Image: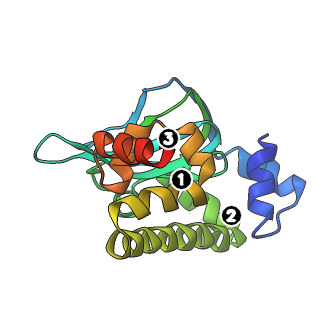
Amino acid sequence: MSEQLFAHINKFVTVSNEDFQRINSFFESQSVSKKQILMEAGSPCDQNYFVLRGCLHMYFTSEKGVERTVQFAIDNWWMTDGLAYLNQTRTDFNIQAVEDTELLSISYEKQEQLLKEFPQLERYFRIMYQIGYGSSIMKMKYLFDFSKEEIYFHFTEHFPEFAQRVPQYLIASFLGLTPEYVSEIRAKKRS
């Protein structure tokens, strides 16, 4: 049983230990190595991932061959291509481990069964999607409102858990910057 998932769910809705024994049976436990791909662009998106320990990133490759990170997930975060998962279609994104990662996964079919059996989890997953959507909206605001330098320092100051764990080139990709530019502004700040 994953005490972490149990505690996370109970931050938002109430489930008993007995109910969680059944809830936990819907999930598969996985260990993935650093740089391992969990989901590839063009493949069906049929898994939702809950990170127990480690870090994942979701990215796409632009027409120019540049990888663009759109999302990170660390301990107690969920990750999937929400629209492809909902519509059971192929994804445009890749999900890769940034670190050795322990996670739980649930298939779309099992999640649908889970929600029928435990309707209170509808609220839990709605809240998770609202948090994710809100984060995406704030990222867009920062991209429009801040200079490139401001967006980098805002990110590293407000999200130190990512800044300390995620390689700078991935942070640059997430913020729409080049790794060279990030090195430049970091050097400027030090001097």
The residue that appears at 20% across and 42% down in the rendered structure is: 66
Give the amino acid type for the residue marked by disc 1 in the picture: Thr
Q: Between residue 143 and residue 147, name the one nearer to us.
A: 147
Residue 49 visible? The answer is: no
Residue 28 position within the rendered picture, expressed as x and y whole percent measured from the top left: 61, 37
Which numbered disc covers residue 124?
none
51 lies left or right of 137: right
- Circle 3 residue: 56
Give the amino acid type for the residue marked by disc 2 in the picture: Glu
Residue 71 visible? The answer is: yes
Q: CA distance from mark 1 to mark 2?
A: 41 Å
The residue that appears at 61% across and 43% down in the rendered structure is: 51
Badge nearest the viewer, 1 or 3: 1
Which numbered disc covers residue 156?
1
Badge nearest the viewer, 1 or 2: 1
Give the amino acid type for the residue marked by disc 3 in the picture: Leu
Sequence-first tag of 3 and 2: 3
Residue 163 position within the rendered picture, expressed as x and y whole percent measured from the top left: 55, 45
Pointers 1 and 3 in contact (CB under 8 A)? no
Q: Between residue 181 and residue 188, name the one nearer to us.
A: 188
- Circle 2 residue: 117
